[in-house]
Amino acid sequence: MRPETSTGGRRASFIEEARRRQIIASAVEVISEVGYGNASLARIAERAGISKGVISYHFAGKDDLMTQLVIQLYVAATEYVAPRVGAAGAARDRLLAYIDSNLAFIAANSAYVTALIEVVTNLRDAEGKPKFSSTDGERDIIVPLVDIMTEGRRTGEFGEFDPLLMAKSIRDAIDGAAGRAVREPDFALDAYAVHLCRVFDRATRQWGGDD
């Protein structure tokens, strides 16, 4: 392959990826404004300033576009949260960084979170079941948190509890905050982050430890 061909291929891939991101961003805006049911490909194309055919070139229909929207948000959240958790020291610090950074991401991406909830609630698979209800998907999100819980117990930073149940409790509190932020635009996520960190800091301590 000649160098110029390779460069041209990379340029084309970059342009295509940029177009896909533009379409997803437009889908987020439309869903946030009119809901999942009214977010037709025609409306999304109009918002993006492109033809409906361009969407069809990049995505195999609305379901594929909605699926990629969810995946992109989860990837973005991971890219935001993981470095902050990784930069923290001991298990307790990583736990608090995990909670705080997840809620900070939600606060900074309210439109995406609104669209995510709409898609996850409404998108169905070929059998009519919610597409994102699989426990496999939840496991990918829960495992890093379980690892923090397990490490904290091993080092004696945390008390006696089931790491999986504690991790699920934390995720439910975070995901619940996302839903509340959508329902209540004035919901103070920063104050809630402080509150939630305090709650789970105390919940994971050794019995008899300092408050």
Image (tube, helix red, strand yellow):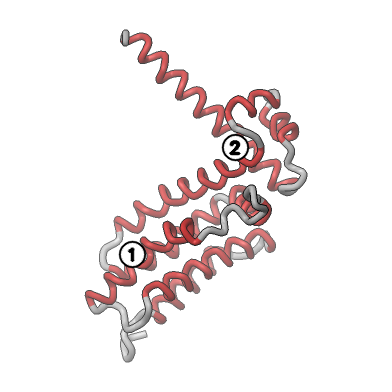
x then y, percent, for residue 91: 29, 68
Q: Residue at x 34, y 82 (%)?
A: 205
**Type of amino acid under label 1:** Arg
Mark 1 neighbour class, 10 Å CA radius: few under 14, some 14 to 19, many 20 or more = many
Question: Badges 1 and 2: C-beta atoms under 8 Å apart?
Answer: no
**Type of amino acid under label 2:** Ile
Q: Residue at x 64, y 48 (%)?
A: 126
For the residues marked 1 and 2, what is the alpha-carbon distance in whole angstroms? 31 Å
Going by the image, does 45 lie left or right of 71? right
Splitting the image into 4 quarters, where does residue 188 fall?
Answer: bottom right
Going by the image, does 56 lie left or right of 172? right
Q: Residue at x 46, y 46 (%)?
A: 75
Going by the image, does 154 lie left or right of 124? left
Mark 1 lies on a secondary structure that is helix
Q: Quadrant of the C terminus?
A: bottom left
Residue of label 2:
24
x then y, percent, for residue 66: 61, 43
Is residue 4 shown above or below 147?
Answer: above
Residue of label 1:
94
Splitting the image into 4 quarters, where does residue 208 fall?
Answer: bottom left
x then y, percent, for residue 143: 38, 62
Tally of marks: 2
x then y, percent, for residue 155: 22, 75
Going by the image, does 122 lie left or right of 177? right
Mark 2 neighbour class, 10 Å CA radius: few under 14, some 14 to 19, many 20 or more = many
